[in-house]
Image (spheres, rainbow, N blue to C red):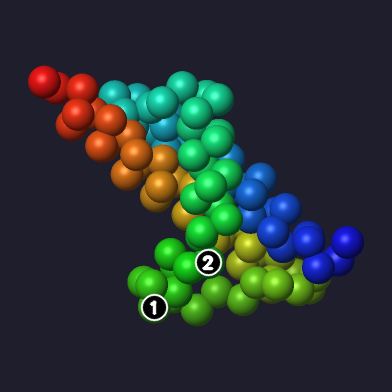
């Protein structure tokens, strides 16, 4: 179970990040359910997104630094992916 803890934390914080991004960008919000789903997907990708931005985030352990890293990467990933999907939806909806 200890090996899945960082992934679970990233997915939950991704859902939160997606909803926070939706609340901040009401015009591009997908609704609570879809914000959560897209945020969960982004949360799973969060560490990769932060590494692409050359930010070193420690994830994968059960110590405090890894847990905080998982929360940060999941939240950022969820928010970024929700924002991108919301922007695409907004652009496509303006026909």
Query: Looking at the figure, which quarter contains the N terminus?
Result: bottom right
Task: Give the vertical position of 62 relative to 28 (above or below).
Answer: below
Residue bearing mark 2: 47
Q: CA distance from mark 1 to mark 2?
A: 10 Å
Q: Is disc 1 placed on a helix, strand or loop? A: loop
Judging depth in this view, the residue of 95 and 75 nearest the camera is 95
The image position of residue 79, as x and y in percent, is 44, 46
Question: Which quadrant of the structure image shows residue 91?
Answer: top left
Q: Is disc 2 placed on a helix, strand or loop? A: helix
Query: Looking at the figure, which quarter contains the C terminus?
Result: top left
Task: Give the vertical position of 69 relative to 94 (above or below).
Answer: below
Residue 87 in sight in this render: yes
Task: Give the vertical position of 4 relative to 29 (above or below).
Answer: below
Residue bearing mark 1: 54
Question: Residue at the spot x=78%, y=61% of the render?
Answer: 4
Task: Give the vertical position of 41 relative to 91 (above or below).
Answer: below
The image position of residue 29, as x and y in percent, is 38, 27
The image position of residue 20, as x and y in percent, is 48, 37
Please tell me how crowded label 2 is: few (under 14), some (14-19), or many (20+) other residues with Cα within 10 Å.
many
């Amino acid at each position: 179970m200890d090996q899945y803890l960082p992934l679970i934390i990233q997915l939950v914080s991704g859902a939160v990040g997606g909803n926070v991004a939706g609340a901040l960008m009401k015009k591009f919000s997908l609704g609570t359910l879809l914000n959560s789903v897209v945020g969960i997907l982004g949360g799973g990708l969060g560490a990769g997104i932060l590494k692409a931005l050359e930010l070193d985030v420690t994830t994968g352990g059960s110590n405090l630094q890894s847990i905080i890293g998982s929360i940060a990467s999941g939240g950022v990933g969820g928010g970024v992916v929700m924002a991108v999907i919301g922007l695409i939806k907004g652009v496509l909806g303006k026909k």
